[in-house]
């Protein structure tokens, strides 16, 4: 039985798991799972090759993750043995300026991760709950944190600064960027399958319930649409994207909002949900005949295209665009709506390839390549975790 590495990729409504065999070259996926925290009763859905397994769980979905994780690990132990599990890798959204790569989670690292909760209040607490519960459950098992912000850590100072007093920048008020594990995954896949494009100027559109764009040059992050927080950039399922700061002042001073109610508005009641008044789910909006649903999707497509053009200016041109994540990989109508705004750059979309969610959705004569590539954040977590374990073993 090979040693197994587990990965946890928590969201606000689900926990994704990855199971990897630790091998010499790189971690090899042997299974993937998900716990939908909105499903009652909870179930661990696990895929191993062609086999799909649904494991009923008795634990409730609440802030105490220990019972849920204990049930999950009891099932894994019966199938793999607890001694087979070598380590756990976690996706952590915010690493601030302190973490520019994966880190073994000790008390000091855990405290630093917790200090960043105000900068990512939708995501960071879920990661902390998982880490703390696992430390209680399996105190001797190494846990590794892999950060979404780390991929953008070496962006130029020109890109990272806001036009605010320098003292605020020095205090950490700057652009960090997010979805870095996803962008790292796409950059690696481009290097393997499209090396000429990887060497050029590419914009990756990570479009899901959380959404952002990243400008890559030779696989490195040059600029991204998200900045200080996960509210920035393009509209999302329930988040507004870039917003005039004067709106926030008005809502606080004259709109009857408190900081807490404003946080709820921005993280949970804006974006596609706020625009449509119907749903945060773009699939439901595509099916809806309501004009508000159409307007919400048109707004999303327009603002996304506008951000693509802004990032193109920073790159000094554009050789390709990659669509990824839930919307980017599976919703041709939204890809088409975005691409119509950037046709003047020389992008020609192949309607049939786009409708089929093909890997290449641009025509052969298109000046700009358009691709659909599934992201694999869990693979990046597994690889970063394995590399850190290897360095620790080599250093004694």
Image: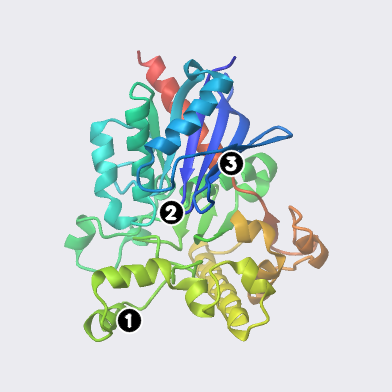
Q: Spatial distance from mark 3 to mark 2, Cα to Cα?
A: 17 Å
Secondary structure at numbered mark 2: loop
- Residue 287 position within the rendered picture, expressed as x and y whole percent measured from the top left: 69, 73
Q: Spatial distance from mark 1 to mark 2, Cα to Cα?
A: 24 Å
Q: Spatial distance from mark 1 to mark 3, Cα to Cα?
A: 39 Å
Q: Is residue 345 visible?
A: no
Secondary structure at numbered mark 3: helix
Residue at 66% across, 56% down: 329
Q: Residue 122: name its quadrant.
A: bottom left
Residue at 28% across, 30% down: 106
Label 3 sits on residue: 188
Secondary structure at numbered mark 1: helix
Q: Earlier in the sequence, mark 1 or mark 2?
A: 2
Residue at 59% across, 54% down: 325
Towards the viewer: 119 or 316: 119
Q: Furthest-left residue in view?
A: 167
- The reply to whether the C-beta atoms of the residues labelled 3 and 2 are less than 8 Å apart is no
Label 1 sits on residue: 247
Q: Earlier in the sequence, mark 1 or mark 3?
A: 3
Label 2 sits on residue: 178
Residue at 55% across, 72% down: 279
Q: How many marks?
A: 3
Q: Of the residues tagged 3 and 2, which is closer to the observer? A: 2
Q: Quadrant of the N terminus?
A: top right
- Vertical comparison of 42 with 278: above or below: above
Q: Residue 32: name its quadrant.
A: top right
- Residue 393 position within the rendered picture, expressed as x and y whole percent measured from the top left: 40, 16
Towards the viewer: 123 or 129: 129
- Residue 353 position within the rendered picture, expressed as x and y whole percent measured from the top left: 80, 60
- Residue 302 position within the rendered picture, expressed as x and y whole percent measured from the top left: 57, 76
Instruction: Judge left or right: residue 79 versus residue 358.
Output: left
Label 1: how many residues lie within 10 Å, few (<14), some (14-19) or many (20+)? few
């Amino acid at each position: 039985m090979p040693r197994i590495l587990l990965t946890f990729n928590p969201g606000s409504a689900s926990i994704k798991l990855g199971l990897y065999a630790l091998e010499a070259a790189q971690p090899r996926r042997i299974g993937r799972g998900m716990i939908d925290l909105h499903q009652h009763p909870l179930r661990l859905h696990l895929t191993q090759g062609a086999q799909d397994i649904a494991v009923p769980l008795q634990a409730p979905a609440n802030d105490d993750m220990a019972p849920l994780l204990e049930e999950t690990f009891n099932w894994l132990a019966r199938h793999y043995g607890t001694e087979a599990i070598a380590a756990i890798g976690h996706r952590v959204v915010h690493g601030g300026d302190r973490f520019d790569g994966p880190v073994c989670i000790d008390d000091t690292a855990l405290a630093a991760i917790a200090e960043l909760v105000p900068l990512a209040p939708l995501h960071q607490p879920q990661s902390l709950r998982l880490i703390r519960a696992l430390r209680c459950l399996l105190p001797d098992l190494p846990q590794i944190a892999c950060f979404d912000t780390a991929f953008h850590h070496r962006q130029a100072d020109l890109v990272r600064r806001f036009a605010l007093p320098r003292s605020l920048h020095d205090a950490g008020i700057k652009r960090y960027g997010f979805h870095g594990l996803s962008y790292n995954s796409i950059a690696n896949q481009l290097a393997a399958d499209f090396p000429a494009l990887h060497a050029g100027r590419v914009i990756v559109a990570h479009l899901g319930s959380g959404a952002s764009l990243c400008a890559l040059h030779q696989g490195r992050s040059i600029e991204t649409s998200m900045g200080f927080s996960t509210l920035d950039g393009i509209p999302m399922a329930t988040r507004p994207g870039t917003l005039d700061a004067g709106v926030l002042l008005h809502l606080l001073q004259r709109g009857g909002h408190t900081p807490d109610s404003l946080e709820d508005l921005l993280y949970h009641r804006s974006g596609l949900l706020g625009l449509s008044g119907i749903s945060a789910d773009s699939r439901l909006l595509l099916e809806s005949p309501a004009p508000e649903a159409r307007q919400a999707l048109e707004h999303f497509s327009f603002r996304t295209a506008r951000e693509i053009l802004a990032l193109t200016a920073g790159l000094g041109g554009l050789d390709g665009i990659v669509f990824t994540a839930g919307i980017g990989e599976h919703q041709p109508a939204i890809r088409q709506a975005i691409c119509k705004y950037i046709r003047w750059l020389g992008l020609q979309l192949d309607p049939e390839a786009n409708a089929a969610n093909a890997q290449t959705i641009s025509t052969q004569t298109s000046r700009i390549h358009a691709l659909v590539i599934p992201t694999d954040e869990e693979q990046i977590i597994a690889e970063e975790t394995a590399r850190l374990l290897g360095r620790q073993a080599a250093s004694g």
